[in-house]
Amino acid sequence: MSDFIKTLLRKNSLRKQCQDVSVADIEKVIADLNDILVERKEDEARLAAEESKRIEKIEQIRLAMKEAGIDLSDLSDVVEASPKKTVKAKYYIVDDEGTRHEWSGRGRTPVVFAEYMQARGIGKDQLPSAE
């Protein structure tokens, strides 16, 4: 939580920060905060209404499936789940035991590659290319 929010949420801290602020400025801040509060309440009400409609649609679909004698497992057989795409290996090394290790070059450096590069004093761009 930011220091600003902590100050706003503690009455004594807020009082201390407002010592040098004019009454007119405090009234303006209060008016602005009230406007923000109204906007937030409207947003929350809109989101709650959207969620309610979504839940209602789900319930309608569930009832239609029940009436048709369709189970959720029946759909999983028909619907194809898109598998996560794999990234081709960009680098490879062969360890002392003759095992080939491949790495796409993305994400954290695998321990095998880190040890290999450190032992040889090379960087990622100097690894053998798998292409």
Image (tube, helix red, strand yellow):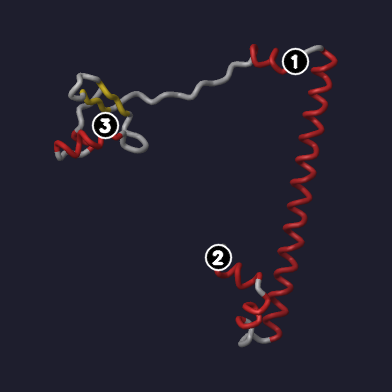
Return the residue at label 2.
Answer: 2
Q: Please report whichever mark, 3 or 2, sits nearer to the chain's N-terminal start.
A: 2
Q: SS class of the residue under badge 2?
A: loop
Q: Residues within 10 Å of mark 1 (few under 14, many from 20)?
A: few
Residue reaching furthest to the front: 97
Three-letter amino acid code at the position of disc 2: Ser
Three-letter amino acid code at the position of disc 3: Val
Q: SS class of the residue under badge 3?
A: helix
Residue drawn 26% across and 28% down? 91
**Residue 108 lies in quadrant:** top left
Three-letter amino acid code at the position of disc 1: Asp
Residue drawn 24% across and 20% down? 99
In the rendered image, residue 35, in percent from the top left (x then y), is placed at 74, 66
- The front one of 101 and 49 is 101
In this view of the protein, can residue 50 be seen by the observer? yes
Q: Is residue 66 above or below residue 50?
A: above
Q: Calculate the distance from the C-alpha at mark 3 to the C-alpha at mark 2.
A: 41 Å
Q: Please report whichever mark, 1 or 2, sits nearer to the chain's N-terminal start.
A: 2
Return the residue at label 3.
Answer: 112
Q: Is residue 33 left or right of residue 52?
A: left
Return the residue at label 1.
Answer: 71
Q: Is residue 74 above or below residue 96?
A: above
Residue drawn 33% across and 29% down? 104
